[in-house]
Image (cartoon, rainbow, N blue to C red):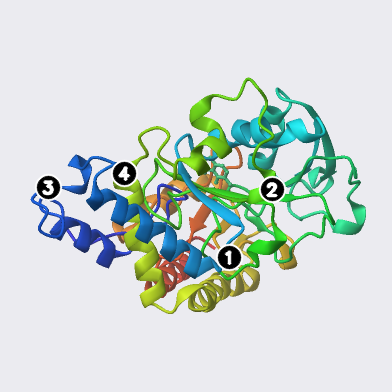
Amino acid sequence: MPRVFNFSPGPATLPEAVLRQAAEEMLDWHGSGMSVMEMSHRGKEFIAIHAEAEAMLRELMGIPSNYKVLFMQGGAIGENAIVPLNLIGRTGTADYVVTGDWSKKSVKEAKNYGKVNTAATGEASKFTAIPKQSEWKLDPQAAYVHICSNETIGGVEYHWTPDTGSVPLVADMSSNILSRPIDVSRYGLIYAGAQKNMGPSGVTVVIVRDDLLGHALPITPSAFNYQLQAENDSMYNTPPTYAIYIAGLVYRHVKANGGLAAMEEHNRAKARILYDYLDASSFYRNPVAKEDRSLMNVPFKLKDDSLDEAFLKGAQARGMIQLKGHRSVGGMRASIYNAMPIEGVKALVAYMQEFEKQHG
Ligand code: PMP
């Protein structure tokens, strides 16, 4: 069976070269006589794997030395609680910008730990646009401002970095981390689940500025205390070792393929092919404001949703899977992360044309 073009929003397609390397190293990692899965997290082999993954991520993203990199468990939904547990205590209040389902979830969770102010919301546009910063009502007393840099379900993405002055900016980058270069120094904290652009599910990357450590609420579970994890090189508890290993292989692969500038070029080229086609067609429609369209997740609807099933079936028959939109919005969604080759997007558009001709 040839590999499919997998448009899943996550866990998502991974670079084939990484999977092959993992397969080769499965039973015997570098002559150690064991699989990475079987290694002690405190042994020299895994410590080297962990250190390389961190060093590679630091290099790729240009992470300044006053930031800690943590590899944690709990996923991004876990971080929706872990962030306020660690950060909100400084002033007791935080600002959230709501741009879709994921940031809505973040707000709901944060409310358990302090006062949450919705600084802006895209609700009026039905979350098809990111509210302009001039409309945000920021509280200078906020412990931080939280955004979701790419809404995986709605397909809206920030193509600019908010300016929050001296209030730290916190971003859920689960679905667009490593998709293009960013200036980490503009953020106080970045978190991301790995299962879109970095590896398998099970590991969450947290990049946090030093001065934000040490403010955890007393109720913070120790495994989720950033300071404790930073002091213990993310090994206060057993980290998700195999997921960290695969993430490290993905980082190395991204570097070998030109780093984040090359990823951006590749991602823009893919997204352009798809959006240009959607805009030219009267059969398909993407509702998102042009300047806020996601390069990673492209939701679209067919003219008549009674054709959805036939569309999905035909796609599957042509080796293209996971195109069904999120259950909350319906329609289709093509997730085209770093590891989706341009051939996958071209094949999708060719199929969309064929389907339109047949049913349009
Ligand atoms: N935030 C964003 C932007 C996401 O895309 C997702 C997962 N699709 C999550 C949070 C939740 O991640 P997890 O299920 O790993 O906790």
Q: CA distance from mark 4 to mark 1?
A: 30 Å
Q: Which amino acid type is marked by label 1?
A: Leu
N-terminal label among 2 and 3: 3
Q: CA distance from mark 1 to mark 3?
A: 39 Å
N-terminal label among 1 and 3: 3
N-terminal label among 4 and 3: 3
Is 240 situated left or right of 181 in this image?
Answer: left
Viewer-side residue, 171 vs 99: 171
According to the image, label 1 marks what residue? Answer: 295
Q: Which amino acid type is marked by label 2?
A: Asp
According to the image, label 4 marks what residue? Answer: 241
N-terminal label among 2 and 4: 2
| Mark 2 Cα shell of 10 Å, populated few (<14), some (14-19), many (≥20) | few
Give coordinates of residue 275: x percent, y percent.
Answer: 60, 70
According to the image, label 2 marks what residue? Answer: 211
- Describe the element under mark 1 as helix, strand or loop: loop
- Residue at mark 1: C-beta within 8 A of ligand 1: no
Residue that appears at 74% across and 48% down:
127
